[in-house]
Image (tube, rainbow, N blue to C red):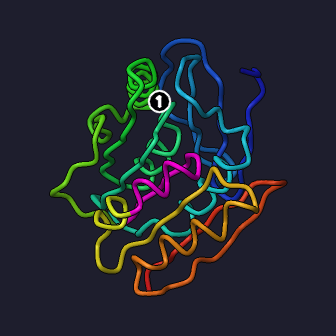
Amino acid sequence: MSDAPILVPPLWRIVPVSGARGPRAESAGRRDLLLTEGAGWGTGAHETTQLCLQALAHYAPARKGWRLLDFGAGSGLLSIAAAQLGAEVDSIEIDEEGIRHGRQNAATNGFAEQIRYSREIPAEKKYAGVVANILRPILVEYAEALVAGMEPDGWLILSGLVATDVPSVAVRFSSLLSGREPEVFSRGEWRALDWRNR
């Protein structure tokens, strides 16, 4: 992991740290996301993570206590960003080392109480937002569970996709979302599909 901060407009500055640090900083209208070395995927350098961070900045409700489901949470970067925007987060990750890394990052950023880790999607909860930055086969496999977790006016962000993945993923999820079509966003060769609340 590089020592240089990564800027992801409009809000985020991802700051690599070694070990625990003090309170988060904010400068020039940006929020710092402190990230420690570890096994969880996601340093903020990858285009799919950046697409998700930008979408979170735009879609997050302007209130505290809204709920986000972060599916395939890895390092917890997206969970921390959502917690900074007032969310209570359920972070889903199957890798135990990834969970440990995510919990460490949540604590380093001061959000250990707002971010809960699990290996399975809670069946009984509904979320204002669902984000899944993971590969196409997993998105397709878990499509019904992800959509079932959305509030009626909730929004969905999917990434981890290249251009050839977009048609099959869009068709699968649109069929579960009353035919609603996603907006497609690009960074380099990577794509994100976003369904906004209507």
Question: With respect to residue 107, does 150 lie above or below?
Answer: below
Asked if residue 22 lies in the magenta stretch, the reply is no
Mark 1, secondary structure of its residue: loop
The quarter of the picture where residue 18 lies is top right
Q: Is residue 139 left or right of residue 151?
A: right
Q: Which residue is mark 1?
A: 23
Residue 50, percent from left and from top: 68, 50
Extreme residue in the right direction: 188
Q: Tell me the magenta residue range.
A: 129-143
Q: Is residue 137 left or right of residue 92?
A: right
Residue drawn at (52%, 26%), measured in percent from left and top?
Answer: 40
Q: Is residue 191 left or right of residue 19?
A: right
Residue 63, percent from left and from top: 34, 66
Question: With respect to residue 39, does 106 lie above or below?
Answer: below
Asked if residue 142 lies in the magenta stretch, the reply is yes
Give the residue type that dot 1 points to: Pro
Residue 88, percent from left and from top: 30, 50
Between 91 and 5, the one lying in front of the other is 91
Residue drawn at (76%, 22%), measured in percent from left and top?
Answer: 2
Residue 112, percent from left and from top: 32, 31
Between 8 and 125, the one lying in front of the other is 125
Question: With respect to residue 13, does 148 lie above or below?
Answer: below
Residue drawn at (47%, 67%), measured in percent from left and top?
Answer: 156
Q: Is residue 163 left or right of residue 96?
A: right
Extreme residue in the left direction: 124
Question: With respect to residue 130, does 5 lie above or below?
Answer: above
Split into 4 quadrants, where in the image is the N terminus? top right
The quarter of the picture where residue 14 lies is top right
